[in-house]
Amino acid sequence: MGELWLSNIQKETSDDEIRQFLCGYGFPSFDWIQRIDGTGTSPAALLGFNEVHGYALRGLQSRVHNLFWKNRTVTVQVLPERYEY
């Protein structure tokens, strides 16, 4: 399972808008999303991909990292694989 951290997004951005944005750059559709408000200045979303590994997401990361989208420069990071025992 791969996880993608997408930050500095507008709080009003819908899940569908995020999905369309990423899929437009070749990402597969995410399976779940968790919103992180933080301090409110740079909201983020944690996206989970059940059938996609982190190494596959890393190959796509450069397509959208530091891209200007919806009046903000978004930051995209692939989280390391986590193994829960």
Image: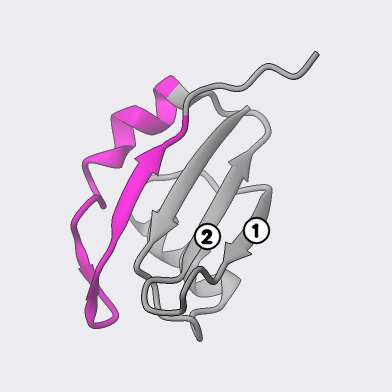
Q: Is residue 67 left or right of residue 21?
A: left
Number of labelled discs?
Answer: 2
**Which residue lies at the image location 29% right of the left edge and 80% below the top edge?**
70
Q: Residues within 10 Å of mark 1 (few under 14, many from 20)?
A: few
Q: Secondary structure at mark 2?
A: strand
Judging by the rendered image, the residue that carries numbered circle 2 is: 45
76 part of magenta stretch:
yes
Rendered position, 23 above or below 21: above
43 part of magenta stretch:
no
Judging by the rendered image, the residue that carries numbered circle 1 is: 34
| Colour style of the rendered protein structure | one colour
Outermost residue toward the bottom in this view:
12
What type is the residue that disc 2 sits on? Ala
Rendered position, 56 above or below 38: above
Place of residue 82 in the rendered image (x, y in percent of width and height, measured from the top left): 61, 22
Rendered position, 54 above or below 70: above
- The quadrant of the picture occupied by the C terminus is top right
Place of residue 45 in the rendered image (x, y in percent of width and height, measured from the top left): 52, 60
Front one among 85 and 12: 85
What type is the residue that disc 1 sits on? Gln
**Which residue lies at the image location 26% right of the left edge and 52% below the top edge?**
64
Outermost residue toward the top in this view:
85
Pointers 2 and 1 in contact (C-beta within 8 Å): yes
Place of residue 69 in the rendered image (x, y in percent of width and height, measured from the top left): 26, 72
Quarter of the image for residue 58 reads top left
**Which residue lies at the image location 36% right of the left edge and 58% below the top edge?**
24
Q: Which residues are magenta?
A: 55-79
Q: Residues within 10 Å of mark 2 (few under 14, many from 20)?
A: many
